Each structure stands twice: as structure tokens, then as C-alpha cells.
Amino acid sequence: MIEDFLRSKGVSYDVIVHEQAFTAQETAAVEHVSGHVFAKTVVVTDGEKFHMLVLPASHQVDLKLAGKMIGKKVHLASEEEMEPLFAGCELGAEPPFGSIYKMQSYVDACLSDQERIVFRAGSHERTLRMRYADYVKVESPKVGEFASE
């Protein structure tokens, strides 16, 4: 699904197939890329809507800062809440394109320091690498600060 989406937008990317890894840091390690380059997704909810946060694997979400950016108090979405949101994706392997899943994406500003980012492509054995500038062009995320090391 994500590859079809990117192809339809005329964006180039590389596919990386690797051994199964579940956490973002494990995936970055398996692929021998820095956790600063690996873009993980975290889904939060304000009780009415879901929002996708995108940040480096080496960082954690500050929910207060995320809520400030979103404009409402948020909490982490549960696995039960998330499961129906991401058709065609393994749970925990969502690509950082909330727009595909009818939610706003928010990216932490520290990712903009990266020429390229790597992210999950819907499974725990497959990731994509693309230019950060292309990601922003295609996704139009809101950029702010909500992550801490």
C-alpha cells in the first residue's frame, strides 16, 4: 500500500528487507542505521481523533508537548484502538503517512536534520528509505517539537 502511494506521487525510495524486528531501535540496529535516522510512529488520541506522531527511534514522545502542538490533551492509543486503523499493516509497523489513514501527521523538528529517513513499510521485515524532503513534500506534516532523548 505505501509503495503504491509513493509511486503514485512520483517519489523515489529504496526497499530494505531484513530479519524480523519489533521495536524501532531493534529495526535500526538490524539495518545498521542510526536511531536518529529511523523514523518511528506513535499514535495518540485526544478521545475524539487519532493523530500520528513521527520522531526518531532514539527519542521518546513528550505527551504534554504533543498535546500542546495538537491543541488538546492526548494519550497513547491502545493496541485495541489502533488495530482497525491500519488496514494492511502489522500492528506496530505503521508507515509515517497518517494521511493515508485519515489522520494528521506531526513530525518532530529534529528529523529535519536528516538527509534521508528510514521507516517501516507495514511489516516488521520491510522498511523504506527516502529523502526527508520528499517525505515532507508528500505528507505535509505539521512540524514541531514533542520528542526528547
Image (cartoon, helix red, strand yellow):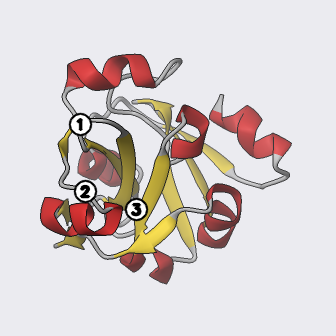
- Tags 3 and 2 in contact by the CB under 8 Å rule? no
Nearer the camera: disc 3 or disc 2? 2
Residue name at image x 40 percent, y 77 percent = 109
Counting residues from the start of the chain, the first of labels 1 and 2 encountered is 1
The image shows residue 88 at horizontal and vertical percentages of 53, 18
Amino acid found under the numbered disc labelled 1: Gly
Please give left or right for residue 9 compared with residue 104 in the image.
right
Q: Which numbered disc flags the more N-terminal residue, 3 or 2?
A: 3
- Residue 78 position by quadrant: top left
Q: Cα distance, mark 1 to mark 3?
A: 35 Å
Tell me the SS state at disc 2. Answer: loop
Classify 56 as above or below 127. below
Q: CA distance from mark 1 to mark 2?
A: 9 Å
| Mark 1 surroundings: few (<14), some (14-19) or many (≥20) residues within 10 A | few
Q: Which mark is residue 47?
A: 1
Q: Is residue 15 left or right of residue 23?
A: right
Residue 99, image x, y percentages: 58, 44
In contact (CB < 8 Å): disc 1 and disc 2: yes
Whether residue 58 appears in this view of the structure is no
* Mark identifier at residue 33: 3
Q: Indicate the quadrant containing the N terminus: top left, top right, bottom left or bottom right.
A: top right
Q: Image point 22% across, 24% down: which residue?
A: 79
At label 2, the amino acid type is Lys
For residue 72, the mark is: 2
Say which label, 1 or 3, has the lower sequence index: 3
